Amino acid sequence: MKEEPSCWNDELITKQSDEIISLFKTIHRTFRCKFKKIAQQYGFTAPQLTVIFHLYKTPDITLNELSDHLMLTKSTVSGIVNRLVSQGVVIREIPENNRRIVKLSVSEDFKKNNDIVRMKEHFIAYCISNTIKNMDPTSVEKIIHALESFILLLDEENCN
């Protein structure tokens, strides 16, 4: 069996790598566009709605923790939080036992007047569920398995 020149293999790997990156960019762009539409329906920007979802799921976290969760700079998240505080959506609390930190949470009034779980379900349905509901379940499982496998390969680099 004759071996292919290594340059062919390198060219193929480069081409496939570029294709994977392009696909992920397209998926990211599509999710961002859909999420923006959902956020607008609720009167928020996509980053604001993301903060609301994170604070609802993880109340009483600090700005640094939230920045880490969102993978955004502290100043970016601070600006988003400031706007949400001024709208009465988010509250800042300084714990008595540690006056040097500020805990962030979704306000009780906002939770009382808005079904955050439903908002998130609406986003998930619009972005994912409605897309896969007419697919063959085996095909969906193949997509999930392929993504999980790729994540495992990427994680071998320990980027955490």
Image (cartoon, rainbow, N blue to C red):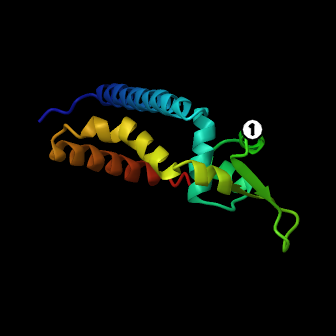
Q: Residue at x 31, y 42 (%)?
A: 129
Residue, far left: 1
Quarter occupied by the C terminus = bottom right
Q: Nearer the viewer, residue 4 or 121?
A: 121
Q: Split into 4 quadrants, where in the image is the N terminus?
A: top left
Q: Which residue is mark 1?
A: 83
Tell me: residue 158, above or below residue 82: below
On the image, the x and y values in percent for residue 80 come to 71, 39
Q: Amino acid at mark 1?
A: Arg
With respect to residue 41, does 114 lie above or below?
below
Q: Is 94 or 151 nearer to us in this picture?
A: 94
> What x and y, as percent, mark residue 40?
55, 29
Image location (x, y in percent) of residue 104: 72, 56
Q: Residue at x 58, y 41 (%)?
A: 49
Q: Nearer the viewer, residue 19 or 63?
A: 63
Badge 1 element: helix
Q: Left or right of 95: which side holds 139?
A: left
Q: Residue, x 27% and y 50% (percent of image)?
A: 145
User: In the displayed structure, does residue 136 sit left or right of residue 93?
Assistant: left
- In the displayed structure image, the side of residue 40 where residue 150 appears, left or right: left
Q: Where, by quadrant of the figure, is residue 46 drawn?
A: top right
The single residue placed furthest to the bottom in the displayed view is 97
Q: Residue furthest right?
A: 99
